[in-house]
Image (cartoon, grey):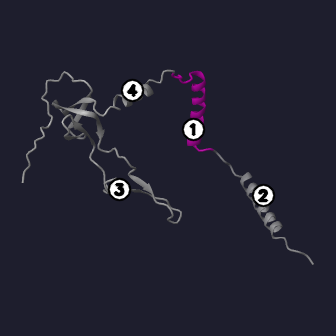
Amino acid sequence: MKTFHFSRVFLTLVMGLVLATSLTLAGCDFTPSAYDQNTEVKDRVMQSATATVPAYRPTNFLERQMINWRAKTFDQPNKIGYVYVLVAGVGPIGYYTVFGKVASLNSFNVPQQKVLTGLSGNNPVVDDADVDGTWGHNIEGVFAKTDNGAYIEIPTTGAMGYIYSDIPLPFKVPHLNITVSSTSTK
């Protein structure tokens, strides 16, 4: 009695398909497209350019040094700064004295998106709530805390902008800090 070996039959079929595909493709003319030819030329030119004029290898890493200096500078919650409000076509119109630094209205303490998992192998990225339970996008702009504790917000789109400095600048403009009063309205 003969036994049937499924794995041998399957292997023979697969080998036959591979052989037939190889023979079919052997007769095909694979001419690279113009795009592929140009890409190959560009790659050879770049290899030659890199070998002839290698990229400079910096040793001082000034960009990293500047980023570290900025981080150290603003790692002081009571640091005094000056925010000059700009209007396009006019220039600075006044300044605020602030504690700490100017912060983006679009900086958040938690990610604003999350990946949903377990949906039939699809893992879409969706908007997520902020820590206050709300969704959405803030306007482009910055905010700061004035030296007397008031919140200021400056939009940075359209005609408005700002300049921040940790020393007063020589602009002849009024001090805009808000006066906080203890009176309440009913």
| 89, above or below 105, in the image | above
Residue topped by disc 2 = 19
Q: Which residues are magenta?
A: 32-58
Q: Position of residue 155 (x, y in %)?
A: 23, 41
Between disc 4 and disc 2, the foreground one is 4
Residue topped by disc 3 = 129
Residue topped by disc 4 = 69
Q: In which quadrant of the rendered view does residue 171 lie?
A: top left
Disc 2 element = helix
Query: For the residue carrying disc 3, how many other residues have a C-alpha within 10 Å: few (<14), some (14-19), or many (20+)?
Result: some
Residue 72 appears left or right of 42? left
Residue drawn at x 38%, y 31% as measured from the top left: 71
Disc 3 element = loop
Q: Give the CA separation, mark 1 to mark 2.
A: 32 Å
Which callout, 4 or 2, points at the residue further toward the start of the chain?
2
Which callout, 4 or 1, points at the residue further toward the start of the chain?
1
Query: For the residue carrying disc 4, how many other residues have a C-alpha within 10 Å: few (<14), some (14-19), or many (20+)?
Result: few
